[in-house]
Image (cartoon, grey):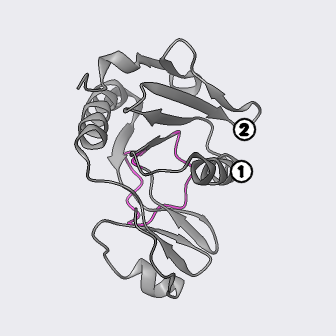
């Protein structure tokens, strides 16, 4: 992501504007998200499809790039999140049961760590951070923080889910 000057907007303007690609809103400033590269896209698609097959019977659905208002001054856009099917809000205020961030080559882990702390503080029970380029993943939970998934298997205990990176990350 190229460094660009900060763009300041009101929360109301952000919520009523569509950005392509969508961006996070942090304390009045738009923050670009790194998206659009092949491995990121394929990983996101495969994982969302797999999740949806597991969630139908639970009254949940996987949503790609759903805006989530995590505080009065912040709206984040996860790559994928899991929410109740009956949540019809355009911008959700509910804690997703699972929040997934997929890294791009230009992502900085320090930025992801700050965002992860915010997500877990918001009350999200499980966060997955996936690096499809280095075939690594981390699992975040409020009590344990962010931990490397050393066996390359992502687990979400609150939804009784687990999947190995090799099952959805493209090999090349």
Residue occupying the point 39% across, 45% down: 105
The magenta-colored residue range is 79-98
Q: Position of residue 129 (x, y in %)?
A: 51, 37
Residue occupying the point 41% across, 18% down: 163
Q: Earlier in the sequence, mark 1 or mark 2?
A: 1
Q: CA distance from mark 1 to mark 2?
A: 7 Å
Q: Position of residue 82 (x, y in %)?
A: 43, 41
Pick the residue in front: 106 or 73: 106
Instruction: Tell me: 10 left or right of 61.
Output: right
Of helix, strand and loop, which one carries label 2? loop
Numbered mark located on residue 121 in the image = 1
Vertical side of 56 occupied by 155: above or below: above
Q: Where does label 2 land, which residue?
A: 142
Q: Is residue 123 on the magenta stretch?
A: no
Q: How dense is the environment of label 1, judged by Cα within 10 Å: few (below 14), some, or many (20 and up)?
A: few
Pick the residue in front: 30 or 50: 30
The quarter of the image holding the N terminus is bottom left
Asked if the residue at tag 2 contacts the one at tag 1, i.e. Cβ–Cβ closer than 8 Å, the answer is yes
Numbered mark located on residue 165 in the image = none
Instruction: Tell me: 74 left or right of 121.
Output: left
Q: Position of residue 109 (x, y in %)?
A: 57, 46
């Amino acid at each position: 992501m190229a460094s660009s000057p900060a763009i300041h907007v009101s929360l109301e303007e952000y919520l009523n504007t569509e950005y392509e690609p969508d961006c996070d809103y942090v304390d009045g400033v738009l923050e670009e998200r790194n998206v659009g590269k092949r491995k990121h896209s394929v990983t996101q698609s495969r994982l969302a499809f797999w999740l949806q097959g597991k969630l139908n019977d639970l009254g949940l659905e996987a949503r790609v790039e759903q805006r989530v208002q995590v505080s009065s001054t912040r709206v984040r856009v996860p790559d994928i999140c899991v929410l109740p099917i009956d949540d019809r809000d355009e911008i959700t205020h509910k804690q997703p049961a699972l929040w997934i961030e997929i890294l791009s080559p230009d992502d900085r882990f320090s930025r992801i760590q700050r965002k992860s702390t915010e997500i877990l503080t918001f009350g999200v029970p499980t966060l997955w951070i996936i690096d499809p380029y280095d075939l690594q993943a981390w699992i975040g939970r409020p009590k344990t923080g962010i931990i490397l998934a050393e066996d390359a298997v992502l687990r979400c205990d609150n939804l009784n889910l687990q999947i190995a990176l090799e099952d959805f990350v493209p090999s090349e």
